[in-house]
Image (tube, rainbow, N blue to C red):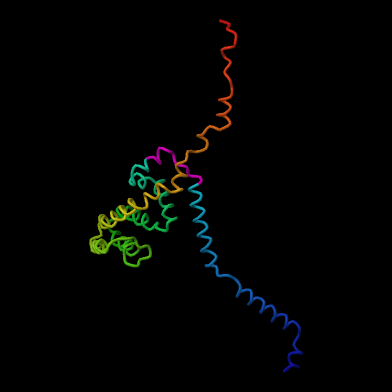
């Protein structure tokens, strides 16, 4: 047996070592899906930071947001800001469901049945992937509404989630750092402190100039 191995050419041992090295490398290589997940999470975090840092909202607009929850979510900027806040609290499924209901009302009648079922299974069914906080009576009422699947199918459920966000998340949003940052006026709107100080220190000697009148 030993003589047989000794008789093998050196290239055979080299090939065997190469194969062993490649197998070891493959075993140590991380799963691609494991790498992709953190990257996606980092991209989401970047989007949140970018929205906070770069999207200054006119003070007139943020003042409207303070007056009512309706004024907040009826604007694109308001919904994006509120969604970013809900993401930080891991409760964005509420605004997602509300937006899905709004979109559902614009769905052609021949596609409503399928779309209604998808929304129900995603947000309302018990243990669904993005289950929202609804009482059992509202859940069963919405289930019954699936039989007709008209534009008012989710009205009751949507109203309950709207009230939940208005009385809970909306109040915290108005006190959040995100809202405070967005409410800050742009730096260009503020006079430089040096300029203000300079204006205060420059004396007015116009009354000392000779009159040529």
- Quadrant that contains the C terminus: top right
Residue at coordinates 69% horizontally, 81% vertically from top-left? 16
Position in image of residue 80 (x %, y %): 42, 49
Residue 55 to residue 144: above or below: above
Residue at coordinates 26% horizontally, 55% vertically from top-left? 155
Does 60 sit left or right of 102 as displayed?
right
Q: Verify whether residue 143 appears in magenta.
A: no
Residue at coordinates 50% horizontally, 59% vertically from top-left? 41
Per the rendered image, the range of residues in magenta is: 53-63
Q: Verify whether residue 61 appears in magenta.
A: yes
Position in image of residue 37 (x %, y %): 51, 64
Position in image of residue 76 (x %, y %): 40, 46
Does 188 sit left or right of 119 as displayed?
right
Which corner quadrant of the image does residue 138 belong to? bottom left
Q: Main secondary structure of the magenta part?
A: helix
- Quadrant that contains the N terminus: bottom right
């Amino acid at each position: 047996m030993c003589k047989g191995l000794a008789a093998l050419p050196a290239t055979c041992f080299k090939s065997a070592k190469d194969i062993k090295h490649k197998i070891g490398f493959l075993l140590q290589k991380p799963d691609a899906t494991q790498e992709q997940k953190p990257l996606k999470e980092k991209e989401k975090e970047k989007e949140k930071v970018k929205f906070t840092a770069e999207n200054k909202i006119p003070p007139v607009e943020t003042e409207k947001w303070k007056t009512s929850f309706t004024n907040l979510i009826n604007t694109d900027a308001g919904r994006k800001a509120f969604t970013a806040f809900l993401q930080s609290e891991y409760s964005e499924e509420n605004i997602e469901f509300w937006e899905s209901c709004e979109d559902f009302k614009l769905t052609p009648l021949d596609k409503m049945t399928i779309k209604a079922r998808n929304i129900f299974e995603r947000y309302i069914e018990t243990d669904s992937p993005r289950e929202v906080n609804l009482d059992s009576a509202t859940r069963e009422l919405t289930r019954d509404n699936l039989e007709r699947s008209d534009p008012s199918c989710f009205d009751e459920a949507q109203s309950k989630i709207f009230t939940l966000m208005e009385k809970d998340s909306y109040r915290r949003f108005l006190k959040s750092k995100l809202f405070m940052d967005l409410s800050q006026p742009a730096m260009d709107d503020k006079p430089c402190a040096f300029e203000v100080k300079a204006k205060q220190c420059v004396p007015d000697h116009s009354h000392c100039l000779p009159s040529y009148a």
